[in-house]
Image (tube, grey):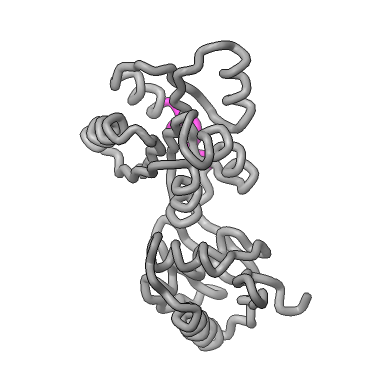
Amino acid sequence: MRVLVAEDDQRLAKMLRLHLERAGYQVDVAQDGVEALLQCQTYRYDLLVLDWMMPRKSGVEVAATLRQEQFEGGILMLTARDTEIDLVHGLDSGADDYLVKPFQSNELLARLRALSRRQQKAFVSTVSFNGLLLDLSSQTISYERHPIDLTRREFEFLSLLLRRPEQVMSRELIIEVVWGIGADITDNALDALVRLVRKKLDAVGAPNLIRTVRGFGYRLGDPHA
């Protein structure tokens, strides 16, 4: 089971990662809210552990954004706030549960086990759009049951668009997801990657679903619209 820990306190994040990995979880760490959102757009997570107060975007903002984007995994909020109005606000944002700092590691693990049982049946393992199918469990993409042979970067690009069909993805976001944050990649390199993906879609009979939004980026769209 894959967990994202979003916590700007590096000492606490390291401790949480250690305890969760010892418990058998696969753990990634984000240092702020924007990084957490980017990682959730890139990878499949079953559970999120979000610090309430993070730079750039708070845990509450991250939870609300992800729920709007149909994230169905469990969300546990870590907070130093313990007033009723604060906790209600956190739960209303989309969090499933919360822990007030400081807390014991066994309590954290118990809360996550409860969330995983609650979310297990609700998790969606596939995403589809106009014949394209993204299988999140096998990390593959096919068209009308025809597998598409993609490189890692081609897969990350196409899966990013598939997770948000009809939503425009900026060039900057695509480059960060495919090549990494801070990568020195030109627009020509991205355009070349898109041409290769379009060619592979054409090879399996898929229509031209990748739409160019001039001056901004790309999106998946109905070719007949």
For residue 31, side relative to residue 157 (left or right) = left
Viewer-proximal residue among 111 and 41: 41
Q: Position of residue 60 (x, y in %)?
A: 56, 32
Total tally of numbered discs in the picture: 0
For residue 67, side relative to residue 225 (left or right) = left
Q: Position of residue 41 (x, y in %)?
A: 50, 54
Kindly indicate the quadrant of the structure image that contains residue 6.
top left
Q: Position of residue 61 (x, y in %)?
A: 58, 37
Residue at x 44% of width, y 63% of height: 176
Residue at x 37% of width, y 71% of height: 152
Q: Which residues are magenta?
A: 114-122
> On the rendered image, what quadrant is the N terminus found in?
top left
> On the rendered image, what quadrant is the C terminus found in?
bottom right
Q: Is residue 118 magenta?
A: yes
Q: Is residue 120 visible?
A: no
Q: Is residue 129 visible?
A: yes
In the rendered image, the residue lying farthest to the top is 83
| Main secondary structure type of the part rendered in magenta | helix
Viewer-proximal residue among 184 and 141: 184
Q: Is residue 97 above or below residue 54?
A: above
Q: Is residue 98 magenta?
A: no
Q: Position of residue 155 (x, y in %)?
A: 43, 70
Q: Is residue 47 above or below residue 107?
A: below
Residue at x 61% of width, y 31% of height: 93
Viewer-proximal residue among 192 and 70: 192
Kindly indicate the quadrant of the structure image that contains residue 67.
top right
For residue 55, side relative to residue 22 (left or right) = right
Residue at x 48% of width, y 30% of height: 53
